[in-house]
């Protein structure tokens, strides 16, 4: 599976959430609402989720192994940083 497009939309409100990303795989499948969040030490991503009737959050879509999670997070954060640089120009 190959990431063929990443679109990042910066969030303007104050807080830890910095952006929302949409990632396209193999020009055939897209996952929306992946959040870019500012953590204590670094940026990280959070998968799209839904609140259950028990007030818990469950991921709607997520990687099933650490290699895919790392690849996806790295690609999204690189695109986020690219977006920030383009805005500064």
Image: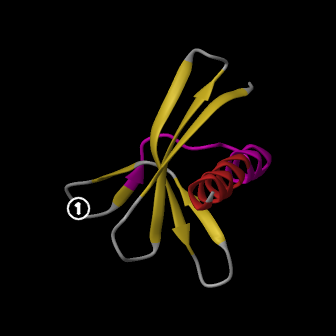
Please check the rendered image and state whether residue 81 is part of the magenta-colored stretch, yes or no. Answer: no
Identify which residue is drawn at 68% across, 52% down.
Answer: 82
Identify which residue is drawn at 48% across, 65% down.
Answer: 18
**In the rendered image, which quarter is residue 85 located in?**
bottom right
Q: Find residue 21 and report its horizontal and vertical position in percent.
A: 51, 45
**Residue sitting nearer the eye, 15 or 28:** 15
Say left or right for 74 vs 14.
right
Q: Give the range drawn in magenta.
A: 58-74
Q: Residue furthest front?
A: 89
**Residue sitting nearer the eye, 12 or 75:** 12
**Residue sitting nearer the eye, 11 or 74:** 11
**In the rendered image, which quarter is residue 7 located in?**
top right
Q: What element carries label 1?
A: loop
Q: Which residue lies furthest to the right in this view?
A: 67
Q: Find residue 23 and report its horizontal and vertical position in percent.
A: 57, 35
Determine whether 36 is above or below 71 in the image: below
Please check the rendered image and state whether residue 60 is part of the magenta-colored stretch, yes or no. Answer: yes
The number of numbered badges drawn on the structure is 1
Identify which residue is drawn at 61% across, 84% down.
Answer: 40
Give the residue number, with chain letter if any, for mark 1: 54
Identify which residue is drawn at 66% across, 43% down.
Answer: 64
Dot 1, how many residues are within 10 Å of its Cα: few (below 14), some (14-19), or many (20+)?
Answer: few
Say left or right for 19 vs 14.
right
Q: Find residue 2 and report its horizontal and vertical position in percent.
A: 74, 26
């Amino acid at each position: 599976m190959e990431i063929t497009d990443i679109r990042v939309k910066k969030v303007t409100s104050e807080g830890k959430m910095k952006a929302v990303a949409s990632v396209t795989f193999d020009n055939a499948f897209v996952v929306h609402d992946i959040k870019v969040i500012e953590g204590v030490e670094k940026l990280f991503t959070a998968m799209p989720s839904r609140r259950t009737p028990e007030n818990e959050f469950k991921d709607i879509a997520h990687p099933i192994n650490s290699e895919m999670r790392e690849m996806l997070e790295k690609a999204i954060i690189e695109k986020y940083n690219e977006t920030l640089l383009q805005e500064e120009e």
